[in-house]
Image (cartoon, rainbow, N blue to C red):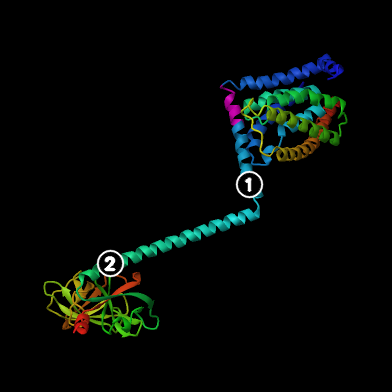
Amino acid sequence: MIRDILIGILFILSVLLQVSFVQTLGYPLELFPLHFVLGILVLHRANVELGILWFVFSAFALSLTGFNTHVWWAYILIAPIGGFFALKLFVSRSVYALEGFGLLMFTIFTFLHIVPMKILNASFHTTFIISTTPFKDYLLSSIFLVIGLYIAFIFAKFLERLVHEIFLVKRIS
Amino acid sequence: MPNSFIKNVLSSKGRLRAALTFFLVIIFFLIFNQFSFFKPVSLGLRQTIFRTGDIFENITNRLFTSSDSLTKRTEDAEAFARTQSLDISRISQLEKDVAELESLLSYSKTQTIQTYPASILARSITKEHSLIIDKGSDDGLRKGLAVVVEDGHLIGVLSNVNRYTSEVTLVSNTSSKIPVSVLNDNKTEGLVEGRGGFLLEMGFIPKDVLISAQDLVVTSGLSGAIPPGLIIGVVSEVIRVDTDLFVQAFVRPLIDVSDYSRVLILDPLANTQYDS
């Protein structure tokens, strides 16, 4: 229960940080997918259901609080896809599995954003403009994703150990 | 999507409870964000995060701007500043030149005597208070001619005339002696000598002559080559000593020679000399 509340708070904070902090930074730092990185981490390491809900709610939360850089259907579709991959393909809890899982999800996510937009000639959602250098932006974002996932993995391991020690000691005492 | 996956997701009560908790936390935030008492907190937090991002953006811009780019921008700015300084200086000098020329031209038109415009080439170092101008005997100049600026302010006399250049002994030169008259009720006449400084000395003024400060001092015309009425300056101080037979006065020129780069040489005898 506490973990679920904390993940909810983490979701809110990451949304605010993504739209108000990361997107304020200049190019190319603005391409850092902070919210996506944390979503991957939740999906892979914490709870698959919460991870799915994370991406589903991201479709709307980012637009409500600021500027969403990707279309809503990309988030909605990537959620169950990510859940499936987390349960069936990337079951290992190593950092390599996490990185592979994150890269694959992000690639599919970008594909889901760009292809329909190109097909629809960006007329369906006028607020989203395909970057003039989509491949370059994707590469940069992927690099940031990999670095972010690695740092988040280290931090998550530290937190898990800390929480485990606190609650385990508490239970024993 | 495999059915077992969906069943796994939906079958567990624990999972539903987790999802519901997560959902409620987000809904709680979104709903309460609409209320006025919560909005300041939410907006304040977002503003703080935004400003932090802004600061980071400025820092990263400074850190990650390539040195070549910075160097080029600095060089461009310096070159622009130099160009601007040169332009300002050039314009200022041009304005000064135009004003000088206009002044000399307007004065020249008022004169019936021959005038020769000339430019100052140098201010003599070896001799104090002298100038070199770019006109000489080939241009018709002679020794002893008056040299003026602006509206007839006498600055000196030609002391040495070469073929293409001439030397002007300024009125402040210790060897300069100009016969003058004071424009007062008495039309006092005297001799103004240079003292090597800014002020000129007028001596041999009769004791009974009334002369006071701010009286205008002009050339008297007693020197054949120097026309009368050329302005020397104004009386700045009168020194009377009871035991002396004469009164001494100091004359302050109204112009500063260092402000000028062009002069006019007056030759009142030119028509007489060359016409005859």
Mark 2–mark 1 CB contact (< 8 Å)? no
Q: Amino acid at mark 1?
A: Asn
Q: Is residue A126 left or right of residue B236?
A: right
Kindly identify which residue carries mark 2. B103
Where is residue B58 shown, x and y percent of the image? Answer: 61, 44
The correct choice, above or below, for B263 with respect to B19 in the image is: below
Per the rendered image, the range of residues in magenta is B36-45
Where is residue A88 shown, x and y percent of the image? Answer: 87, 25
| Front-lying residue, B98 or B235 | B98
Q: Quadrant of residue A57?
A: top right
The correct choice, above or below, for B25 with respect to A150 in the image is: above
Residue at position x 32%, y 85% in the image: B160
Q: How many marks?
A: 2
Residue at position x 72%, y 19% in the image: B23
- For the N terminus of chain B, the image quarter is top right
- Between the C-alphas of marks 2 and 1, the distance is 56 Å
Dot in front, 2 or 1? 2
Residue at position x 16%, y 79% in the image: B189
Callout 1: chain = B
Kindly identify which residue carries mark 1. B61
* Magenta stretch secondary structure, dominant: helix
| Front-lying residue, A134 or B23 | A134
Find numbered disc 2 in the image and state the secondary structure of the residue it sits on. Answer: helix
The correct choice, above or below, for B95 with respect to B192 in the image is: above
| Front-lying residue, A83 or A108 | A108
**Numbered badge on residue B204:** none
